[in-house]
């Protein structure tokens, strides 16, 4: 089966800095893949390259088998929906109008129906008529997610959707993305929270300096060695009641691997 | 909601036009007004139909053009402070027109108008290039101020180097902004330009709405954003260029008109276009009437009047916008 999102030996540059350096990645329909890595590792660049916002200088990116460069803007939009981390909305539009922008090729009534369904899906149906400037950051994040869910796209590209959200909203967002994957969409999401990545992702891709440093089932990709080398963490997984938990501290290279500078086990947020 | 707003604005414009025709610096008795209606060729008829009416309709068209240009630019740049005056589009259009006048091209039909349009297009293009690279709304305003100042400096240079003080005085007077002594011929060419720009703006409207979500989301939305952006830019430049060519520089209408009606359309940059144009037309017909009947030795220039009222409004909107940007 052709993967929904494929990147092969991808190079990309941004402002004189190489942000992707021979990155390889596949995301299949029905799969939720989490991209993790430290700040500046290239997570956003990887997602933006699939969205067609960052041109590759080498390698190739394919959407459902076709080279992204050969697709028109509308064809791309039918294949991938992109939700950026930036949550600024210029005007005080009602939530339902924002969500309806996910379906610009439907008639007004159909778009509004799709928007309302997507708002209901993220438990924001009651906000439909409220202006986005009168919302909390968490509410606005859900409305913007609804916009991405209202698109007809076969794949979702979601850049740090839970940054700055309260714990309940973080779980809601990841549950909805997981449900979309189960319903057959390909979902690529960048995350900083390794515990949530391990709990929700079918597969974790670890990026470091634009290269894929690990790719596999969450606990296979996030080994103690990778977490020390890529994240500078001295960390190990422990089994919690709701799934794996990360016990971690800052890694001190001078005192050998596995030495913790922190004292209390805590999850990395 | 939108329909009712448009109806109210249209009625307000009708009333303002009627007042603009009936009131003036030379008061007419009811009998004279009656005569004007019976016999348009009579003295009072001349005053009403050949002097006041074309002037009022020109003000309507210029105001509508500026209101539309303001609404389009605010949508395009996602910035409530965008306006053809603030961002320098009017100043560059005026520079184009002033150059044409001083170079003696005023006798060539259409030369001043085309120069004004070219100037507006140039400034609009620079703004879009800049806004594609820099996201901060504050930076764009600063860039617009720089364009405006530079165009103003070049216009001042023209005065400085112009050998003929009479030509300079004419250009100066024109730059202050006025619809005094405009005729039906002016109405005849500015109206199609404004209608064409409105048509372009309507085509670009879905793109303006999509831009509410930001540049990158719009680019991945499937809409042909490059084309829609160009249409919006052409609409704003054509409207501004036409307005400047017929009336000189009239500031702040493009800023204030969209601001007045934005809440009524719940922020939607697409549904904002028609009400903003109508509100701009109404404001300028009203402002011109007030400028005309204000008892002063020299008639108040319309551009001076709108700037006096508009500048404090700009400060107020900037104050509110700054609070939103901090979020």
Image (spheres, coloured by chain):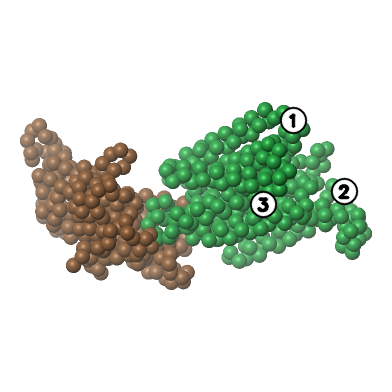
Chain colours: A brown, B green
In x, y percent, where is residue A72? 37, 60
The residue located at (32%, 56%) in the rendering is A69
Res B26 label:
2
Labels 1 and 3 share a subunit: yes
Left/right placement of residue B319 relative to residue A17 reads right
Q: Quadrant of residue A179?
A: bottom left
Asked if the residue at tag 3 contacts the one at tag 2, i.e. Cβ–Cβ closer than 8 Å, the answer is no
> Nearer the N terminus, badge 2 or badge 3?
2
Labels 2 and 1 share a subunit: yes
Q: Quadrant of residue A74?
A: bottom left
Mark 2–mark 1 Cα distance, whole angstroms, equals: 34 Å
The residue located at (74%, 41%) in the rendering is B301
User: The disc numbered 1 marks a residue on which chain?
Assistant: B
User: The disc numbered 3 marks a residue on which chain?
Assistant: B
> Nearer the N terminus, badge 1 or badge 3?
3
The residue located at (63%, 44%) in the rendering is B115
Mark 1–mark 3 Cα distance, whole angstroms, equals: 32 Å
User: The disc numbered 2 marks a residue on which chain?
Assistant: B
């Amino acid at each position: 089966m052709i993967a929904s999102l494929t990147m092969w030996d991808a190079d990309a540059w941004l402002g004189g800095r190489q942000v992707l350096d021979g990155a390889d990645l596949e995301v299949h329909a029905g799969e939720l893949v989490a991209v993790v890595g430290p700040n500046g590792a290239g997570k956003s660049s990887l997602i933006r390259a699939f969205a067609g916002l960052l041109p590759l200088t080498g390698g190739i990116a394919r959407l459902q088998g076709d080279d992204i460069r050969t697709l028109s803007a509308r064809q791309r939009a039918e294949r991938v929906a992109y939700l950026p981390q930036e949550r600024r909305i210029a005007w005080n539009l009602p939530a339902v109008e924002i969500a309806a922008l996910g379906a610009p090729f439907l008639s007004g009534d159909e778009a509004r129906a799709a928007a309302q369904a997507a708002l209901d899906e993220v438990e924001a149906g009651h906000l439909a008529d409220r202006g986005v400037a009168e919302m909390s950051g968490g509410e606005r994040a859900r409305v913007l997610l609804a916009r991405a869910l209202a698109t007809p796209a076969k794949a979702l590209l979601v850049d740090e959707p839970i940054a700055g959200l309260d714990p309940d909203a973080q779980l809601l967002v990841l549950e909805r993305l997981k449900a979309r994957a189960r319903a057959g969409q390909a979902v690529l999401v960048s995350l900083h929270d390794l515990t949530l990545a391990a709990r929700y992702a079918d597969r974790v891709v670890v990026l470091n300096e634009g290269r894929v440093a690990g790719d596999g089932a969450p606990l296979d990709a996030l080994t103690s060695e990778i977490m020390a080398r890529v994240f500078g963490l001295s960390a190990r997984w422990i089994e919690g009641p709701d799934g794996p938990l990360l016990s971690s501290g800052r890694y001190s290279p001078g005192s050998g691997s596995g030495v913790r500078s922190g004292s209390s086990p805590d999850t990395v947020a | 909601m939108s329909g009712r707003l448009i109806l109210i604005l249209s009625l307000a414009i009708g009333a303002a036009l009627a007042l603009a025709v009936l009131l003036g610096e030379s008061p007419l008795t009811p009998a004279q007004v009656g005569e004007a209606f019976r016999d348009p060729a009579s003295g009072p008829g001349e005053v009403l139909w050949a002097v006041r009416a074309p002037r009022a309709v020109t003000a309507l068209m210029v105001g509508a053009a500026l209101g539309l240009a303001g609404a389009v630019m605010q949508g395009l740049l996602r910035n409530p402070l965008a306006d053809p005056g603030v961002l320098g589009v009017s100043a560059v259009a005026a520079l184009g027109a002033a150059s044409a006048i001083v170079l003696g091209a005023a006798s060539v039909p259409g030369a001043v108008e085309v120069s004004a349009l070219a100037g507006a297009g140039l400034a609009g293009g620079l703004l879009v290039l800049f806004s594609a690279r820099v996201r901060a709304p504050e930076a764009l305003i600063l860039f617009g101020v720089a364009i405006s100042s530079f165009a103003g400096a070049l216009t001042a240079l023209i005065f400085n180097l112009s050998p003929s003080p009479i030509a300079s005085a004419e250009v100066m007077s024109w730059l202050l902004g006025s619809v005094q002594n405009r005729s039906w011929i002016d109405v005849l060419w500015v109206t199609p330009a404004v209608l064409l720009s409105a048509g372009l703006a309507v085509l670009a409207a879905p793109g303006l709405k999509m831009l509410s979500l930001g540049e990158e989301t719009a680019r991945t939305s499937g809409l042909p954003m490059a084309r829609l952006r160009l249409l919006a830019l052409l609409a704003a430049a054509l409207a501004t260029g036409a307005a400047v060519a017929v009336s000189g520089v009239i500031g702040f209408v493009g800023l204030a008109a969209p601001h007045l009606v934005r809440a009524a359309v719940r922020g939607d940059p697409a549904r904002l276009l028609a009400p903003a144009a109508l509100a701009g037309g109404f404001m300028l017909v009203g402002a011109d009437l007030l400028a005309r009947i204000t008892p002063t030795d020299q008639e108040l220039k319309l551009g001076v009047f709108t700037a006096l009222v508009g500048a404090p409004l700009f400060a107020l909107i900037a104050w509110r916008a700054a609070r939103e940007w901090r979020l």
